[in-house]
Image (cartoon, helix red, strand yellow):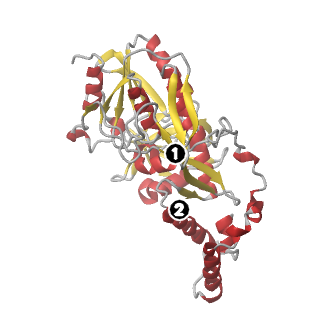
Amino acid sequence: MKRKHSTLTLVCSVILAAFITFEVTYIFVDNARRKEIYGITEKYQSELDGVEAKYIAEYASLNEMYNDLPEAFKSSDLFKKLACIDLYYRTQYVGELDEDQIAYYVMNGYIYGAGDKYGSYYTADEFQTVIEDATGDTVGIGVYVTYDAINGTMEVLSVMPDSPALEAGIKAGDIITAVDGESIADLGYYGALDKIKGDIGTSVKITVVRDGVEAEHTLVRKKITTQPVTYHKYALDSRIGIIRITEFNDAVPAQFKSAVESLLADGVESLVFDMRYNPGGTLNSVVDVLDYLLPEGDITIIRDSTGEVVRTYRSGKSSIDVPMAVLVNGNTASAAELFTCALKDYEKAVVVGETTYGKGTMQRILMLPDGAGLRISTNMYDPPKSDNYEGKGITPDVVVELDESLKDKNFYKITDEEDNQLLLACRELGYEG
């Protein structure tokens, strides 16, 4: 779209569990940068400065924000220079100006120049997806898939309860080959993502192959709750329960507690928490989970840019007292690292796998006047007793890489019997095989 608004004004002014969960299974490090969202949902309020923050929904007049900026900001050299560049391009440039593209690169250029490696600028549409990811509620068809770039297809890994996909009879193992008549191979990853997502009540046609037979399903998109927590008994020893968390969002605490209670009631004596490829998520969700697991004491300490403590989250007296292990790798990041380090600090769990990503920096998501969003690094969060792991990661108690024969296999299709990292974790908990 070509518009003639001032770039200066613009300056001031994202799974597909919702749509199909591509990114949880495909672009992990990117998610570690995109999904660490704190203090933005209606369920929780940010208290980092010790004062309850206003909900984002309360900012009904954000377009007036620019007028409220101090004159020193309006008249800064940066704004003046940008205004001059904008003027020259509007009066002398031989090409056409794409306002959205200019805004995107200006915003991201500022973040890059500031050196905020976890910062991001979101368009209005992207910002809404970020909010959905944080809450665990989203609009879509309700399947988790893995993307096969070689064959240009997507395989269904699981189907969510009470979802359009479940109602249509779609099952794990089904191969999605087309969306609304266009092949996944032609659409590509992001094209398929855009094609499947949409508004509540609208329809999308999915072409599915099962046992060599092709079928078409017309699904009506609806609001669904993602399922970031899955669990089962260890295939080689039913005394051990395996709980995998793919990300931390507001749906996790209830799902996690239900998983633990179900496994313990079913005779499980010890637990393995699989944090491999977990990119992190909301602070409140991981704090709730750790409060459930840990004895009374600190969970995390939040510091501002000067190093001053602005908030300490603490656990209550109740805890879960069974042998535990945590599985990690280089894509275990942020909130998943806090989960890991806190259990290690309290000597509640043995950590098995590979050194983690190393992200101890905290971000806030802020709405901009035009509905876009800014992700900015504002604080450091420390584990209960250890030093902050920013840039270093967490070294496991038992270091072991995934077997070479499994590195080219889709992680979510590796069986218990094949998984050598899981095997060592279970041996730490008493499995003798």
Give the residue drawn at x 39%, y 44%.
358
175 in relation to 371, above or below: above
Place of residue 85 in the rendered image (x, y in percent of width and height, measured from the top left): 60, 81
State which tag comes first along the sequence, 2 or 1.
Answer: 2
Q: Nearer the viewer, residue 59 or 196?
A: 59
Place of residue 18 in the rendered image (x, y in percent of width and height, measured from the top left): 56, 43
Total number of numbered labels? 2
Tell me the mark number nearer the camera, choosing from 2 and 1.
1
To which quarter of the image does residue 162 belong?
Answer: top right
Place of residue 134 in the rendered image (x, y in percent of width and height, measured from the top left): 58, 41
Asked whether the residues under the numbered discs 2 and 1 touch, taking CB atoms below 8 Å apart as contact, a structural biologist would say no
The residue that label 2 is drawn on is 111
Q: Quadrant of the N terminus?
A: bottom right
Circle number at residue 307: 1
To which quarter of the image does residue 168 belong?
Answer: top right
Q: Would residue 78 appear left or right of 330 to someone viewing this image?
A: right
Q: Nearer the viewer, residue 194 or 289?
A: 289
Q: Residues within 10 Å of mark 2 (few under 14, many from 20)?
A: some
Q: Quadrant of the C terminus?
A: top left
To which quarter of the image does residue 413 belong?
Answer: top left
